[in-house]
Amino acid sequence: MPLNLEFKPCPHCQKSVRSNATRCHRCHRLISPSVPNEIPQSNSEGEGRDGTEHGAAHYGGYDSGADDFDYDEYLEEEFGTRPKKRDWKRDWKRPVAWLVIFSLVLPLIVALAFLIRSF
């Protein structure tokens, strides 16, 4: 491993990355040599040089102002439809397993109680 490594800031998150890196290890974005490696300056109102709020994404991120977001559609897309109710005719193994475990552990607990009481 070379001892003298050169680093530069990521153009997206400003994390220090190797100068020959093609992808940032923090934000996982591609580092293009055409993107300038400088921190954007902000004016007194907290806006960047391009007029967006500092930290706002240029591609419709959290500060895009788009009101066409449908939360119900997002939930269905991410998590699918509501879970179906259990079919106890098919899903009988878990309650039976708990019943067997309980019936095996209960006599041990009773035997320990009698053993402790006998002292």
Image (cartoon, rainbow, N blue to C red):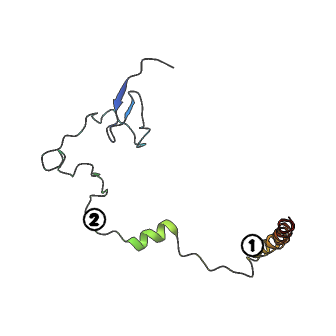
Placement of the C terminus among the 4 image quadrants? bottom right
- Residue 88 x %, y %: 72, 81
- Residue 9 x %, y %: 33, 33
Hey, what amino acid is under mark 2?
Ala
The local secondary structure at tag 2 comes to loop
The local crowd at label 2, few if under 14, some if 14 to 19, many if 20 or more residues have their Cα within 10 Å, is: few
The local crowd at label 1, few if under 14, some if 14 to 19, many if 20 or more residues have their Cα within 10 Å, is: few
**Vertically, is 85 above or below 114?**
below
The local secondary structure at tag 1 comes to helix
- The residue at which mark 2 appears reads as 66
Which residue ends up furthest to the left in the rendered image? 44
Residue 74 position by quadrant: bottom left
Residue 7 position by quadrant: top left
**Vertically, is 11 above or below 106?**
above
Query: Of residues 73 and 8, which is closer to you in this image?
Result: 8
Q: Residue at x 75, y 82 (%)?
A: 89
- Residue 103 x %, y %: 83, 73
- The residue at which mark 1 appears reads as 94
Q: Nearer the viewer, mark 1 or mark 2?
A: 1
Alpha carbon separation for disc pair 1 and 2: 47 Å
Q: Residue at x 43, y 42 (%)?
A: 28
